[in-house]
Amino acid sequence: MRHLLSALVVTTLAVTTLLTAGASPSRAAVPWTPKPAPMSTPWTDQVPVDHPLPEYPRPQLTRPDWANLNGIWDFAVTARDAAQPTTFGERIRVPFAPESALSGIQRKITGNDRLWYKRTFTVPAGWDGRRVQLNFGASDWETTVWINGRQAGAVHRGGYDAFSYDITPLLRSGGTNTIVVSVYDPTETGGQAIGKQRIQDVTPHAGRSIVYTASSGIWQTVWLEPTAAAHITRLDLVPHLEDSTLRVTVRAAGATGAGVEVTVSSGGTPVASATGRVGAEFSVPVPNARLWSPDDPFLYDVTARLTGSPGGDKVGGYAGMRSIAVKEVNGVRRPVLNGSFVFQTGTLDQGYWPDGIYTAPTDAALRYDLEKHKDLGFNMVRKHIKVEPQRWFYWADRLGLLVWQDMPSMDSGKAPDGAARTQWENEYRAVIDQHRSSPALIQWVDQNEGWGQYDQARIADMVKAYDPSRLVDNMSGVNCCGAQDGGNGDVVDNHNYVGPGNTPTEPVRASVLGEYGGLGYRVQGHEWYPGGGFSYEDQPSLSALDDRFVGLLDGIRENAMPAGGLSASVYTQITDVENETNGLMTYDRRVVKVDESRVRAANQALVAASRTLGPPVKLPLEQYVSIRVTTPGHTDRYIRHYDGLGYTEAVDSGSSDLLKQDATWKVKPGLANRLCYSFESRNYPGEYLRHRDFRIRREAGDTSALYKADATWCPVQGEGGIRLSAANFPGQYLRHINAELWLAQPGGTHTWDNPSTFTEDTTWSVEAPWAP
C-alpha cells in the first residue's frame, strides 16, 4: 500500500508538470528529426518529442508545482573558445547527449568543441510572488547559464551532480524569457571524472574496448520550480535503529536557524513528528519500525515544513529504516544488514543505452534494468563509475536493491594533478550529499582498479567521516591492474575473471568480490557491431551459459562464502555494452540470455544459505595429519606424493617409513586466505600440495599470488568427512580418480570430472598422521 501511494504521488507530480509547464521552444531554422539508433530498445519509439522524461525528477524532495524544460531546444557547436553564436542552426532533444541518436544530433564531440543550447519559456501566472529556481539534474561537464542575456550564478563544473540557480532577478515580468546554456566537455582530454566515457565514433565500430561512447552536455532533466524566499533545499534522513529514530537534518536557503517540523507517515497515517532547527540534526521517533530490506523494501513518507511564518515552505520525501555495518559473524568479518549477515549477490551495472547512451530513453526503461535484477534473484547492484539520475535511486529504494555506488573515476592513463584532485573530491562530496537519504545505497566505492588513483587511505577516511552511515570500499579490484590498496575502509575487494576466485579474509575488513564472471554469448541480430563482440569467456550456447553461470553461483554458495569467507559478489554484467557481449541481457534489452528461473533459484539458494551459515570448518593448525579416502571400497588409501605428483595409496602399519612420510602433511594457515588451509609436505618442508593445470602436485613455494592461491584449500563439511575446494576456484574440488589426484568440477568436461562417485571421491577424512 505504501509503495502504491508513493507511485501515485510521483505520478501526480508528473501530470502537474505537463499541465503547468507553460514553456515552449524558441523558433529554429530547421525542423527537428530523430536519428536512427544503432540498436533500438523497446522504449526507443516511446520517447515523446516535446516532453521526454516527464516524470518528477527529484523524489526525495518534492513540491507540487514545477515545469519541465525537457524537449526540443535550439543547438549549435562552436570552437571551444568561441563566443555565443548569433544563430543556432540545429535542434536537439534535451536531455539526451548530442552523441546519442535520441538527441537528433548523433555526432562525436571533442575537447575542441563547445556546446550551445537555447530555448524560450514563460513563467506560469500562478507562480507570481515566488522565487523561481532553475534546476539541472546533471550536465557534463563545465556549464554556464544565461537568462535573458545575463549570467545566472557561477559556472558549474561536474558531470554527475545536480545544480540549481535562483533566476528570479533575471526574469522578464510577464513575458517570454530566453535561456542559453553553454557546455564544455573535454572528456578524457581533461582531468575531471569521466567514468568509462571516451571520445570515439558514435556509430558502431570494431574494437575490444571496455570503455564506451562519451556523453557530453545536458544529460538529465532540466526544470523550473517556484519556491518561497526561505525554502528547503535538502533533507538528510539517516535511520538509527539503535533507538528507533530517524535522524533528520533540514538544509534550507534564506532560513538559517529557522524552525522546522518533520512528520513521518505510513499509508497516510502519521507515525510521529518532531521539531528542530534548519541545519541542526534532530530525531523523529519511529516506534516499532518496519525495517527496509530487499525482501521488504518498506518506505515511510516524510514531510518537512518551515514553521517560522504562516504558509512556510513544505516538501515531501521518503525514508527507509535500515542499518548497515561490518561485524564478526562466526569468526569472520561480514557486512550485516539490520544486524544480520545476508550475502550480497549483484551485477555490475554500467548504465549505458544504445539509443540514449548515458540517458535511459524513458523512466520505464530506467526501472527495467533494476526489475530484471530482482527477477533474476539478485539483491544488490553495483553502479559502475557512473551516477544515475535521482529517479534511479528512487526505483532501487522502492524495488528493494542494495546499491554499491562508485564515484566515477578520472582517466586511467594519467596521474591527476592538484586541480583535478580538488575537483574530483568536491564532486564526490556533492554526489554523497545528493544521495544521503537513499536507503538502498549502502556502500561508497571510491576508486576502481587504480584508475586515476591517489591518496586511497585519506580519501576512504574522508568519505567515512563525511558519511559514517554507510560502508566504504577504498579500492575495488585491489589485486588488479596496478591498483594500490589504502588498507582501510570497511571491505577488501578483489576482481577475478572468470573467477569467482579468492578474496583473502582479513581481521578487520569484510571480503568481497567486486567483479567476476564476464561470460559471453553473442545473440545474432542483437549486437552493437555484428561480429565484433567479445567477453572474458565465450560460451558455445545459451544452455552452456546457463550451466557455467549457475555453476559460478553454486561455487560461491558451497565454498567461497562458507569456507573462504566471501560476503558479496558482483557479476559482470547485467547487459551487453557496445562490443562487450558478457551481459545477462543484450544491449538493446530485447533478449534475456539466461534461464531466469534457474538463475533466480541459484541466487535465492545463495542468499538463503547465508542466513543459516555456521562457523567455518576448523582443521588442527601446525599439526601433522594424514588425509584418507572415504569412497567405499577405497577407505584404506591416503593422499601421498610421489615424484612431485599427488596420488592415493593404501597405507597401514606395515607400510614403509617413506610411504608414511609421503602420506603425512602439516596443516598450515592458508597461504592465500587465513580462513583456509595449506598442506606442507612432511618430508619436503616448504613444498605444498597445490593444483597446476588441474593436476595435484607437491611443489616448492614462491612468493607469487598464483602459487599461494593454488596451494590454498578451503574445507566445507561433507557427508562423512570434508571436501577441499580450491581457494581460487570455488566449486572445484580435490578429487582422486584412478589413484591420481586432480582438481575436478561437477558437470565439467574432463575425464577427471566423471560424475560417477564424484561426491564420494571429493570427500576426505582428516586423520592422525602416519609419520608424527
Image (cartoon, rainbow, N blue to C red):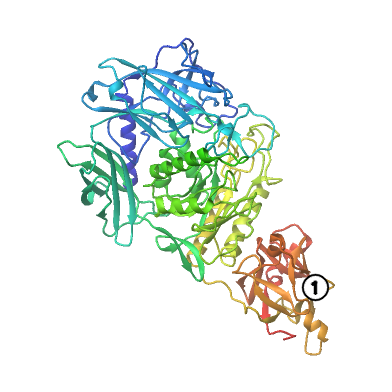
Judged left or right of residue 210, residue 155 is left
Residue 499 shows in this picture: yes
Numbered label tally: 1
216 or 611: nearer the viewer: 216
The residue at 48%/12% (across/down) is 31
* Residue 499 in which image quadrant: bottom right
Judged left or right of residue 713, residue 661 is right
Percent x, y of residue 276? 22, 49
Q: Secondary structure at mark 1?
A: loop
Name the quarter where the C terminus is drawn.
bottom right
636 or 683: nearer the viewer: 683
**Relative vertical location of residue 315 with respect to residue 518 in this rendering, above or below:** above
* Residue 645 in which image quadrant: bottom right
Percent x, y of residue 340? 43, 63
* Residue at which label 1 appears: 739
Residue 650 shows in this picture: no
